[in-house]
Amino acid sequence: MHIPTVLLTALSFLVLLGLKTALDFHLAPRLVRWLSGLPSRGIFRFKWTNLRGEWDVLWGAGGSSDFQDESRRKAKLTIWQFGPYCYGEFVTGGSSYAMFSRIRENYLVGDWYATEDSHGYFGALQLFLRSERRLEGKWIGHSKSVVDVRADLFEVTRRDR
């Protein structure tokens, strides 16, 4: 038995197990951004829909008086992807937002939040993967300043490359 080979194999297994655990327990949204350039098929054993890149996003106001103007509900979304995990960021109306999600079958399912106050304005989203160019679905969320839970449409279209 060759000890360095056994140690290297064990170390590789532990690193991959730690990475998978961090991703599964939602501990690593920024880790996805950092790892998005690495090939992941060897880890996850599946070829996922490629969502990495620049997107245009438009969401419904959900009854919010702050977002009645459509220009405040449009933004450029940048998505980083590592296997089935996606991390995205966009800025609108002077506020920054992020999303951390996972591809499950034909859906992108995850959370969104304001980056300045992730406990102040946040929620969930579920988007149908219509194609590698278009995602459609709904967001649901609330803020600490309003008791109501709101929901509306969420549409994402890939920018031309």
Image (cartoon, rainbow, N blue to C red):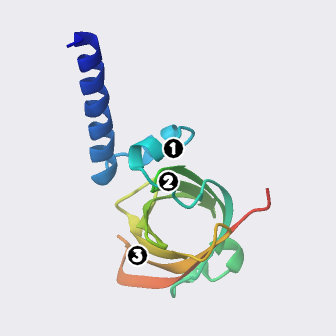
Q: Quadrant of residue 30?
A: top left
Whole-angstrom CA distance, mark 2 to mark 1, is 6 Å
Q: Residue furthest front?
A: 1
Q: Which mark is residue 14?
A: none
Residue 25 location (% of width, % of height): 27, 52
* Disc 3: which residue: 141
Q: Nearer the viewer, residue 77 or 157?
A: 157
* Disc 1: which residue: 33
Q: Residue furthest bottom?
A: 63
Residue 29 location (% of width, % of height): 42, 49
Q: Quadrant of the N terminus?
A: top left
Instruction: Report helix, strand or loop for mark 1.
Output: helix
Q: In this image, 121 relative to 62: left or right?
A: left
Instruction: Report helix, strand or loop for mark 2.
Output: strand
Q: In this image, 153 relative to 55: left or right?
A: left
Label 2 with label 1: CB-CB less than 8 Å: yes
* Disc 2: which residue: 87
Residue at image location 56% in from the left, 55% down from the top: 89
Dot 3 amino acid type: Gly
Whichever of labels 3 and 2 marks the residue nearer the N terminus, that label is 2
Residue at image location 53% in from the left, 40% down from the top: 39
